[in-house]
Amino acid sequence: MPILCLEANWNGKRPSSQSVESTLETLCGIHQDSAVHLWCNTMEELTYSLRDMTYGFRQGTLYLSFHGLKDSILLASGQRVGMKALADLMGNRFAGWNIHFGSCNTMKSENAPWFKKTTGARILSGYITSVGWVQSMSTDLLFLSEAYRYVRPSHLKKRMLFLYPDLIKLTGLVIL
C-alpha cells in the first residue's frame, strides 16, 4: 500500500533536517513499497496535491505532515486549513485510503468522524495533543508500519494499544 506524503516546512527552511522523508524511506524498505513525498507550503500547492495531481494509486495512505491546531493543519505560510476545507479539496478522491494527520491537535475535533465519512477514508488517525517531533516521528513510523497489516480500524487500534499503550497515551494518537 503506497504512501502519499504531503509535508510543510517545519522550521521555515528547505531542505530541512526535520523531514519525514527518512521515515518514508524506512517504511518503503521494510514493506517493499513506494512513496511519493511532496512539499506543500502554500494553499496553491496543497490544492494541486489533493485535488488536481494524479498519482496512479488506487488505494494507499495519505500522510499529512504539518504543524497543527485543533481541527486544522498549518501551512508553512501560517495559513490555517480546517478539516472541512480539506474535505472539500479531497472530495471522495481518497475513498478507501488511510488518512493520517502527523500534526499536533488536528484530531481534537468534533469534525473528525464527519471528515472520515465525507472523504470515504478507511482509517482516519492523528493526534489530539501537542506532540514533540521525536515522539511524533516514532509514533508515525510504528503506526504506519502496523497499518500495512491491519485493514480494519478496530484491529489496528487494538494492535497499537497492545504494543504501545504508553506511547499512545503520551502522544494522544487517535484511530477512527
Image (cartoon, rainbow, N blue to C red):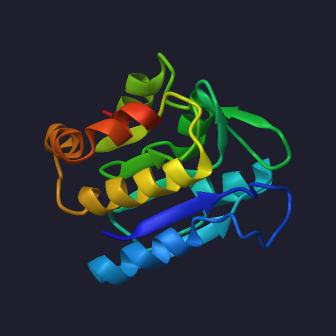
Q: Nearer the viewer, residue 166 or 150?
A: 166
Give the quarter of the image for residue 78.
Answer: top right
Residue 26 at x, y = what percent? 42, 77
Judge whether 172 appears above or below 38 on screen: above
Judge whether 70 appears above or below 95 on screen: above
- Direction front: furthest residue: 166
What residue is shown at x 60% (from left), y 59% (from top)? 6
Q: How many marks are shown on the rendered structure?
A: 0
In the displayed structure image, the side of residue 151 where residue 19 appears, left or right: right
What residue is shown at x 30% (from left), y 83% (from top)? 32
What residue is shown at x 68% (from left), y 51% (from top)? 47
- Direction top: furthest residue: 110
Judge whether 143 appears above or below 26 on screen: above
Residue 125 at x, y = what percent? 39, 40
Quarter in which the C terminus is drawn: top left
Q: Nearer the viewer, residue 46 or 41?
A: 41
In the displayed structure image, the side of residue 29 where residue 64 appears, left or right: right
Judge whether 53 appears above or below 136 on screen: below
Residue 118 at x, y = what percent? 41, 32
Residue 37 at x, y = what percent? 58, 71
Q: Is residue 25 visible?
A: yes
What residue is shown at x 35% (from left), y 31% (from top)? 117
Quarter in which the N terminus is drawn: bottom left
Q: Is residue 55 visible?
A: no
